[in-house]
Amino acid sequence: MTKFRPCIDLHDGRVKQIVGSSLSDSGAGLKTNFETDRSPAWFAELYRKDGIRGGHVIMLGKGNEQAAKVALAAYPGGLQVGGGITADNAKEYLDAGASHVIVTSWIFPDGKLDRERLERLSKTVGKEHLVLDLSCKRVCGADGIDSANGIDGVNSAAPRWKIAVNRWQTLIDIEITAENLADLSNYCDEFLIHAADVEGKQQGMDDELIVFLSKHSPIPCTYAGGARTLADLEHCKEISNGKIDLTIGSALDLFGGTGVKYDDCVKFNKA
């Protein structure tokens, strides 16, 4: 059944909420929705107290390693961690308290799936401790028209999404398809998929992506991007037949948002 999944996004060692499409290596143009002096442990302890499991600690760039481990230590076994994870450092985050490690860019060097890396990582941590982040962006349909809009608001082609790596800066030539989801599910326990085009903008979710994932993901999957009200939780539950979990970030009152109260999300999960 659909559940609210919390997050702790870390940038420069601090808890922040940023517009995903504004991330870059240089830091120029970064758009920050929220920043706090509260420790990552404060948020982790809150999630632990309320029994909200499976939240994502995401390290957005370097310099966040210690902050991530502080959060994991505050909620052992209750949080997943991602950002810069490889087969060489994954186990140290599990030892620090993570239930799962979340991996994306490292298994797609040069824009291609490195199956040897994926197999080594899955064997190193165990399939049951691995989440693959297949965050993506929409691409144009076969006729060159944006599949989200088409002509006069009518979809001109089936929607397509390409995986985005390197903090969503780089689109690679691998799409979110039923075949790819089935293949990659053999190596991991869950998928985490941000709709990078709408992440942090509070302008609505990518409903078509949620529906697609609900039909074709053979393992648990969490969607993130664009949620702005509590009704979005109900909507996600409805259109996914309860199969897709939802992360809410910038709209949440915990992160300065006005659209969703954290306490209401806790009640939703308990109900």
Image (spheres, grey):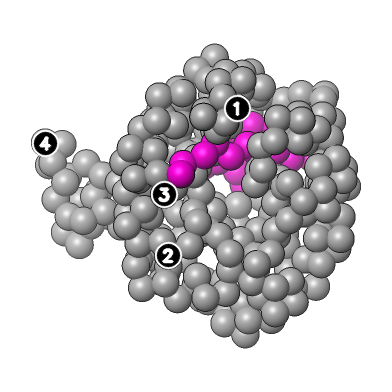
Q: Quadrant of residue 110?
A: bottom right
- Whether residue 2 is in magenta: the answer is yes
Q: Is residue 28 above or below residue 215?
A: above
Label 1: few (<14), some (14–19) or many (≥20) C-alpha neighbours in 10 Å: some
Task: Give the CA separation, mark 1 to mark 3.
Answer: 18 Å
Task: Give the CA separation, mark 3 to mark 2.
Answer: 10 Å
Using the image as rendered, state which of residue 252 and residue 31 is in the foreground. 252
Residue type at mark 2 is Pro
Helix, strand, or loop for circle 4?
Answer: loop
Q: Which residue bears the numbered disc 3?
A: 243
Q: Quadrant of residue 241?
A: top left
Name the side, left or right, on which 21 lies relative to 150: right
The percent coordinates of residue 256 (x first, y second) are 63, 18
The circle on residue 168 is: none
The percent coordinates of residue 127 (x first, y second) are 64, 71
Using the image as rendered, state which of residue 179 and residue 15 is in the foreground. 179
- The region drawn magenta spans 1-24
Task: Give the CA separation, mark 4 to mark 3.
Answer: 31 Å
Q: Which residue bears the numbered disc 4?
A: 152
Dot in front, 4 or 3? 3
> Is there a contact, CB below 8 Å, between mark 1 and mark 3?
no
Q: Quadrant of residue 261?
A: top right
Mark earlier in primary sequence (3, 2): 2
Dot in front, 2 or 4? 2
* x 36%, y 73%: residue: 179
The circle on residue 266 is: 1
Q: Which residue bears the numbered disc 2?
A: 218
Mark earlier in primary sequence (2, 4): 4
Task: Give the CA separation, mark 2 to mark 4.
Answer: 34 Å
Dot in front, 1 or 4? 1
